[in-house]
Image: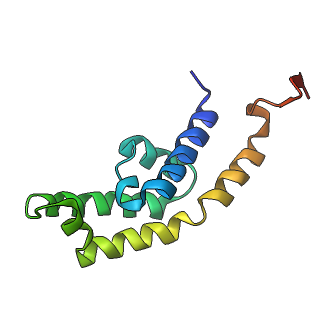
Amino acid sequence: LLPPVLQTFMLVYEWHEYVGWEGMECGIFFESDHTHQQLQALGLLELAQKMVTARIRYDELKDKAENFHEITEDDIFKMLIIHCDQLAREVDSILLQFVKDNIDVFPCRHNRHEL
C-alpha cells in the first residue's frame, strides 16, 4: 500500500491523464468518490464540487435522454463541464507543488542508486 501522499498524487495524476484522453464528460466518473476526496486534499475544492454537481446533472438527465450524446448537449451540463475543464487547468501546477512540498515521501532513484 502506498503512503497517503503517494496515493493522492497517483490518483489525481491518473484522473488528470484520463480526462486528457477521454474528456471531462467521462472524467467526472473516474473513481468519483476517491477523486473528489483527493482533489479536496489538494485544495481544489471548487473543481471537486463542480464535478459532483455535473454528476448530479448527468443523473437527472440520464432517465430522460436517449443516449450519452443527448446528455452532453444539455446546456447546463455543458456549462458545468466547461467550468470543470477551466478549473482543471491548474492541476499540473498544483501537483508539481504538492510533489515539491512532499519530496521526502517520493522515492528518489538515479541510475538505480539512491540519491
Task: Name, please, the residue furthest toward the bottom.
Answer: 75
Indicate the position of residue 77 as horizontal and vertical percent values.
28, 70
Determine the residue positioned at 19% across, 57% down.
59
Q: Quadrant of the N terminus?
A: top right
Against 84, is 16 above or below? above
Indicate the position of residue 53 as horizontal and vertical percent values.
30, 62
Left or right placement of residue 72 versus residue 86 in this view? left
Q: Quadrant of residue 28?
A: bottom left
Against 112, is 6 above or below? below
Left or right placement of residue 33 versus residue 41 in this view? left
Determine the residue positioned at 42% across, 41% down.
34
Left or right placement of residue 63 versus residue 13 in this view? left
Determine the residue positioned at 15% across, 62% down.
60
Between 110 and 84, the one lying in front of the other is 110
Against 58, is 77 above or below? below
Q: Quadrant of the C terminus?
A: top right
Indicate the position of residue 48 as horizontal and vertical percent values.
43, 57
Color theme of the render: rainbow
Q: How many numbered circles are shown?
A: 0
Against 76, is 25 above or below? above
Indicate the position of residue 106 as horizontal and vertical percent values.
74, 33
Determine the residue positioned at 71% across, 52% down.
96
